[in-house]
Amino acid sequence: MSAKPSPLIRRLADWDHQQLLDLAAEFRTPTYVTDLDRVAANYRRFTAAFPEARVMYAAKAHTGRAVLETLVDVGAQIECAAAGELQRAIRAGADPNELQYTAVNPPGRDLNVAVDIARDHPGLTITAGARDTFDRLADRGYDGRIAIRINPGIGTGHHEKVATGADAKFGIPATEAPELAAELRERFDLVGIHAHVGSGVLMDDLDEHCEALATVAETARQVGEETLSFVDFGGGFGVPYRESEPPLDLSVVADRVRDAIGTLQAEITFEPGRYVVADSSLILTEVNTIKQALETTVVGVDASLATLIRPAMFDSYHPIRNLSAPGREPIAASVGGPCCTSADVFCTDRPIARPERGDILAIGNAGAYGYELANQFHSQPRPAEVALVDGTPQVARRAETLSDVTRLEREL
């Protein structure tokens, strides 16, 4: 794909509304639409801001094959957090010798997959944040490349559930890293220090985020940066979900991050995920029910928390736009899906051009942890994903059918 100028953030108003309506008619709803050119542009913009760093894509944000292939094509290496992500990355064309596997309480089957890959591809790096995980690797005969995930004690991001830098689940305390590193060097090829402090970091979060990065850099110096190949500062760089929020000024962010990190002999690594894919996707959904309640207008749609669970899980804001009649007078609408739970709501009392049955709504910024968290609650088939390549739609994932929902079940 050719590099094209692109805005720092893609708002819902920036999409071609007629094309979206045509896609809804052709592929039905709910449907994810992912612009692969936008994915590539976001990655290029990030790497241009940090030309001195290695920039890996954090696959957990969106592991769709079309997305991974797009990023591999523009030179991205891939960071994986599970065995399935390793296999997806390799299938998409990533070099196994450049993969990084970040194990968090990994099941034995996941460790087995990573160790098996490393036997033939010794460039694979396994990152772990527990002594027990390193022992389990040694039990499997692994003595290859490892990185220590540390916990800097500072968490940042848009929600407490993603502030991993202060969560004991993730990494070993930074103060324990020098002693552990000395032990691990006797058994493995220790090549890196790793940390990820949170997700969805915007300009207002930079002070705390940079404080955490400074802790990671200082820990690397205490471990012996001259002996390390890289220091991985994770991702966490966010995008504005609300229309009133400005996008990250990456030139300012890069300067602040460099000041916090200081001089390091080891290569600097970042792992953006959300920043690369969040605004590349949206969801098309059809209005099927209009109900006037006492205090609001309830708008029922065919998407649900099974399609996009982030509002229910994180109380996340996603912009919503009526594509069918943007010129209508807006009303205060509460938009929700067909699931039998009060959590199945995308917004409450939000101004939306007055919806009518059959209208198509777009739910924006659905690229990060959108399809990744899609599920089959209420036995709902997961939706299709349509990829735009140079503006041309192609089916990246077909919609599931009701038969797909029960395909793995067996009569007893």
Image (spheres, helix red, strand yellow):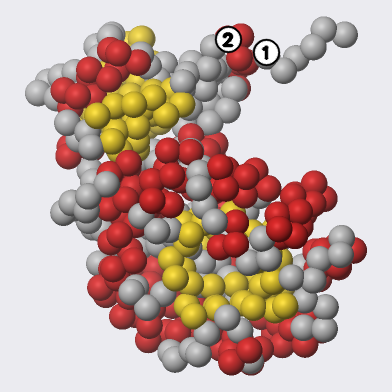
Report the front residue among 63 and 330. Answer: 63
Q: Are marks 1 and 2 in contact (CB under 8 Å)?
A: yes
Q: CA distance from mark 1 to mark 2?
A: 7 Å
46 vs 146, left or right, is left
Task: Report whether residue 331 is seen.
Answer: no
Relative to residue 19, is residue 121 depicted above or below? below
Neighbor class of circle 2 (other Cα within 10 Å; few <14, some 14-19, many 20+) is few
Report the front residue among 96 and 240. Answer: 96
Mark 2 lies on residue: 402
Q: Residue at image x 86%, y 64%?
A: 141
Q: Kindly indicate the quadrant of the structure image that contains residue 337.
A: top left
Tally of numbered discs: 2
Q: Residue furthest left?
A: 327
Q: Kindly indicate the quadrant of the structure image that contains residue 412.
A: top right
Q: Residue at image x 87%, y 60%?
A: 140
260 vs 122, left or right, is left
